[in-house]
Image (tube, helix red, strand yellow):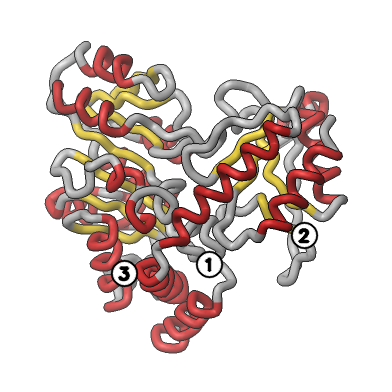
Amino acid sequence: MAFGWIDERAQARRTAGLVRTLRPRPADSPLLDLASNDYLGLARHPGITEGAARAARTWGGGATGSRLVTGTTELHAELERELADFCGFEAALVFSSGYAANLAAVTALAPHGSLIVSDAGNHASLIDGCRLARGTTQVVAHADPDAVRKALGTRGGPALAVSDTVFSVDGDAAPLAALADACREHGAGLVVDDAHGLGVLGAGGRGAPHAAGLAGAEDVVVTVTLSKSLGSQGGAVLGPARVIDHLVNAARTFIFDTGLAPAAAGAALAALTLLRREPERAARARAVAGELHARLTAAGLEAVRPDAAVVSVRAPSPEAAVRWAADCRAAGLAVGCFRPPSVPDGVSRLRLTARADLREEQIERAVRVIGATRP
């Protein structure tokens, strides 16, 4: 029977406690949210929603076509200029999602015969980019510049190292400066995904590459998402102008995809404007993460020290993690639940995201609920 194998896979997931389900949320959820990636609390900010509404009223509900046909508006061009300027790069190219941006950067910058060196903890979008690229991928130990250096030394020709800047599972930061040094020793490029760094790290939230002194470097390409700190949707690639021009001509997820909806572009522009005006939001998000970690560890929980705004709390098993997250939800707290295969080390955990707009009593309540519901 067609698709009969799906039933076997479904049963295997149930047996392993790995079934995933969709849970539609209402517009006005009563839950305290430590599960979303709204690090700066901007997704519902009046200035950001008005930016989205204004763009929709001006440009319409959709981009109407691919970027190379009708999908590039003056609004998209303005957003690209603002992103590049804010993060310190020569040029930027906006995509319909951060996932599409990562696929574009990796596949277009790793031609046939090239070597891609990929961190073992990379996000699925970078992994899929490596799988789709025509180069050969070598996976190396997590956050290990020496492993990258060794891999790059195994062959000549075009080469690329690929890494998250802040890893989404535990919230630990990559050693970007050391990675760049390893790449430069072998004439390789460095592509980093700053999805969890933009808006949180660097001066005023300008991102992890900016903090590491790599902004504007001719051998560094950065991808970002607009759907986390900026409270919108979409993604972008930042880098030298010649790299961006190459993506326009070679990146399939740019050429063949409909452009980002004007409302999302308008929201992201409004968020950048607000972040320039209120740079303290970035430091506040980091401070909340640090406070969550300190209180969770004081309560005897195994929490990983955060380098940005993600706080990871270990669970004894996938089943325990699911039950723990469900008990938190029943107590009014939304938390993330990461289990295999989403976690590269096979260790299930709750994943908490600090937000700049969390109040002291909300932090206290979150820690109290997590402690009271622990397996």
Question: Residue 42 shows which numbered tag?
Answer: 1
Marks 2 and 1, how far apart in space?
17 Å
> Label 1 amino acid?
Leu
Which residue is pictured at 43% across the width and 48% down the height? 195
The one of 337 and 299 positioned closer to us in this rendering: 299
Q: Which residue is mark 2?
A: 31
Q: Position of residue 24 (x, y in %)?
A: 74, 60
On screen, residue 236 above or below 175: below
Labelled disc at residue 322: none
Where disc 2 sits, the SS reads loop
For residue 79, the mark is 3
Q: What residue do we see at 48% from left, 58% from top?
A: 229
Marks 3 and 1: CB-CB under 8 Å? no
Residue 108, percent from left and from top: 26, 42
- Between residue 294 and residue 123, name the one nearer to us: 294
Q: For the residue carrying disc 3, how many other residues have a C-alpha within 10 Å: few (<14), some (14-19), or many (20+)?
A: many
**What kind of element bears circle 1?**
loop
Q: Residues within 10 Å of mark 1 (few under 14, many from 20)?
A: many
Which quarter of the picture shows residue 81?
bottom left
- Mark nearest the camera among 3 and 1 is 1
| Secondary structure of the residue carrying numbered label 3 | helix
Q: Are marks 3 and 2 in contact (CB under 8 Å)?
A: no
- Residue at image position (22%, 55%) is 88
Note whether residue 362 is visible.
yes
* Residue for point 37% across, 42% down: 193
User: Which label's residue is closer to the chain start, 3 or 1?
Assistant: 1
Q: x%, y% of residue 64?
A: 40, 75
| Residue type of the residue flagged with mark 3 | Leu
Quadrant for the N terminus, please. top right
Residue 132 vs 185, above or below: the answer is below
